[in-house]
Image (spheres, rainbow, N blue to C red):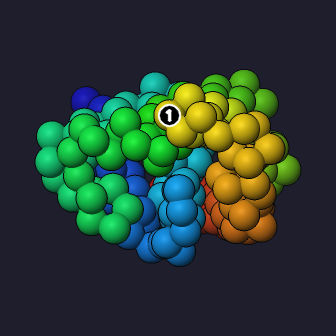
Amino acid sequence: MKNQIHQNILCALFVALTAVCSQIIIPIQPVPITLGTLPAFLSGVILGKKYGALSMVVYILLGAVGVPVFSMGRAGFSVLVSPSGGFIVSWIAVSALIGWICEKYGKKFWTVAGAMAAGNLLCYAVGVSWVIALTGMGVWAALGACMFPFLPGDTAKILLGAFLVHRYGKQIRI
């Protein structure tokens, strides 16, 4: 019972952390650069594939029903069907993938960094495909607008996330 309560509390904390980090943005078009991917990545490592994905489902449902948790204080189903929507929705699978890799291969620094990189590639694949489908942009135009500008920041988030897990993982019993 105590372990279940611990997992539920961490799940709720990741929903809140994702909401807060999603407000830290660089507003570019068609998709803003946001710190929200960092807790989406970390949720998989810390909560595992099941609860990590669940925390992202709860985050997305809160935003869909009108709680202003998406970047720039946006909310509603309309955000999920906008160019940003594919990236946000992908966080469910991203968290599950990262959690699965870490459950299978461990939580050493480079394993976590590799898992987060794989999750980030999945996020790009879903998000860029979503942008192409919604806007009719060509592949290179969509990559130029929705992936290439994100690479330096996402690399930094991956390294920061792996460092945080490596440095503080034992304090939160992961």
**Relative image position of residue 101 (x, y in whole percent):** 71, 30
Q: Can residue 57 be seen in the rendering of this structure?
A: yes
Residue in view at x 48 percent, y 58 percent:
36
Task: Describe residue 9's horizontal placement relative to residue 122 as left or right.
Answer: left
The image quadrant that residue 8 belongs to is top left
**Relative image position of residue 72 (x, y in whole percent):** 34, 68
Residue in view at x 65 percent, y 40 percent:
137
Figure check: 114 above or below 31: above
Q: Between residues 53 and 47, which one lies in front from this camera angle? A: 53
Residue bearing the label numbered 1: 134
Q: SS class of the residue under badge 1? A: helix
Q: Between residues 82 and 111, which one lies in front from this camera angle? A: 82
| Callout 1 amino acid | Leu
Numbered-mark total: 1
Q: Between residues 123 and 81, which one lies in front from this camera angle? A: 81
Q: Between residues 20 and 70, which one lies in front from this camera angle? A: 70
Figure check: 156 above or below 118: below
Task: Describe residue 46's horizontal placement relative to residue 159 as left or right.
Answer: left
Mark 1, other Cα within 10 Å: few <14 / some 14–19 / many ≥20 = few
**Relative image position of residue 97 (x, y in whole percent):** 63, 29
Residue in view at x 25 percent, y 30 percent:
1
Residue in view at x 33 percent, y 56 percent:
70
The image quadrant that residue 104 belongs to is top right
Figure check: 135 above or below 72: above
